Image (spheres, coloured by chain):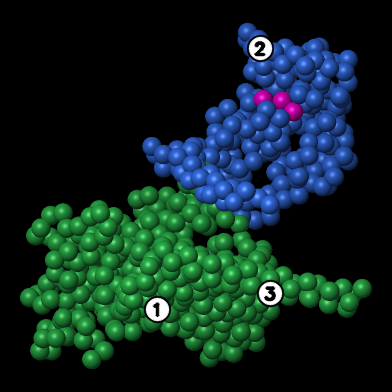
Amino acid sequence: MILALDPLYLTNIGLAVVLIALLKVVLAFAIVLVAVLFMVWFERKVIADMQHRIGPNIAGPWGLFQTLADGLKLLMKEDLVPEHSNRFVFKLAPFLAIVPAFLTFAIIPIGGNFESKGGSVRIFGYDTYLQVADPPIGILLFLAMSSIAVYGVMLAGWSSGSKFPLLGSVRASAQMVSYEAALGLSVLAVILQTGSLSTHEMVADQAAGGFLGFIPNWNIIVTGFVPFLIFLIAGTAELNRPPFDLVEAEQELVGGFHTEYSSFRFAIFFLAEYLNTINMSAIIVTLFLGGPSGPVLIEGIDWAWGILWFLVKLFVFLFAFVWFRATLPRFRYDQLMDLGWKLLIPLSLGWFLFLAALNIGNDRGWNPGVVVGVTIVGGFAGGALLMAAIRTARTERISQEVDAHG
Amino acid sequence: MADPLDYIRGFGVTFKKLFEERLTLQYRGGKGKPGKPDEKREKGLRFHGRHVLNRYEDGMEKCIGCELCAGVCPAKCIYVRGADNDPDNPTSPGERFGYVYQINYLRCIHCDLCVEACPTQAITESKLFEFSFTNRNDAIYTKNELLVDDNGKPRWLPWEDWRDGEDEHTSAWMRATSPAGDHRYEGVVAWSGELGHGVRSPEVGQSDSADESSRPEMATTEVEQ
């Protein structure tokens, strides 16, 4: 029953259904690879533009084939395995990074007519969703996969048998584990709103008519913008992208966890990194911006509009991630941990409780003004307690340091 | 405490850059395609490039083989051996001439001390820096490569990336500092420039630097041939 949410599997499962499922898998694989090629090129171009440079422009029109050329070059490089490495884990780690990245893409709805057909399209006479799988656990798969990706980074650094990769991977695992908490808590706000874990349900929920007829019913508005902001920041940290790229801080750690990797194994890490960027943008679009939902402007090719809206929204976030990189300097490690543990996690937890109180108040018919007032007072009280606790802990620590070192 | 809005303004700054002028020049190391030639930035007048050995207007070599350049060279990249001129067929005016003259460009740091040391202004520097070698012997330039041609221009060697105009003003560095750094030479035509260019306008020294307009054009005052 795990895939049964897709109307494709409600009919008699015959050869045609299997073939359509296979076609979707192959297509998703191809789309992802092409998207990565594009993303690497796009990032280099935009960041060059933001730095008064031109960027790649030799290979192909506007340098579009630059990534392809780089990939071919990497394929032909010597594949080095360091002498002091754990050979099995060293070879396993890149795949632990790339496989979760591919799997995450499977749950992202990239199209479908959400206006009138409930998000499905017709392929060869069968109704189906434009996503590889729509498991009932939905968004949890994304959280699980991003947790598994930590192992890829962690084991890559550890198995290299080298100092800097180890330091990089220790940083990576600490960073990714701490930001996963904030990430999960902001996803909770969306789940609370939708009442379902399925990504398709989330999009369908947001596709419903919004306030006043023209403001969309997107979760970014419905959940009050704060979970979106937290998700964006925590997501950037989860991706190890600037300004949270301490994992591969070139000035301190050579290349970070993949210092010892060369050739195709390095290419796989590179691929996984950019694939995760695309995935994260797509997840943000799905969770907060209504995924592929949008008006069907021309009937007849209704399937194309969902894909178009999805790509437009996706593009905004791909640009945003490049923009972050061009603008923000790298965080210091203690600043990174402070931001994660002392700001993002309490804030997302508080906001989640606030939304929960609103929902319960709504169900029970309580006065909304009183509910908001009480939760705001409660939130401030909690925040004050937290800040007091942090300050006390800091003064304790400083006095201990003074005692120890005079 | 920084203004929190500054974070937002930072994003504005990078976004504005998207629409500003690019500083990159499309230079591919001489591999520009037809219709898309390499762009090159204009070099400064006093740019230190590869050396040339100059000749007088009558074709005589200026080098007298004194080895002062080799002596002053901090990188020890110059090798000079002088020899007596054949009285019937002299190479340079005077007793001696540079019989062997070699510069190793793997060592040269282009400090131009040799140019300052030369008593006859025999060695000066062109503005060429785009030259490379595939073995160490090729990096040693001899008189064959260094000596200017009959028109007083540096030779355009096949492995060097010359552009029009780069072989002019090869003595600009010397004239720019006024010979020997002596203020008495300011505004005085101290010595003529390269072969074939006649007399150039004299250097204006630092004491006149307040008056920008009186600074001489490095462009030449050509003498009618």
Q: Write down the colour of chain A.
A: green
- Check disc 3 and report its element: helix, strand or loop: helix
Residue tagged 1: A142
Residue tagged 3: A389
In the rendered image, the residue lying farthest to the right is A406
Question: Is residue A123 rendered magenta in the image?
Answer: no
The quadrant of the picture occupied by the C terminus of chain B is top right
> Both on one chain, marks 1 and 3?
yes
Residue tagged 2: B221
Determine whether B223 is above or below A335 in the image.
Answer: above
Residue at the spot 55% in from the left edge and 46% down from the top edge: B9
Q: Chain of mark 2?
A: B
Pair 2/3: label in front = 3
Pair 1/2: label in front = 1
Q: Residues within 10 Å of mark 2 (few under 14, many from 20)?
A: few
Where does the image place residue A366, in percent across and percent down from the top left?
37, 71
Tell me the magenta residue range: B169-173
Q: Is residue B195 left or right of residue B22?
A: right
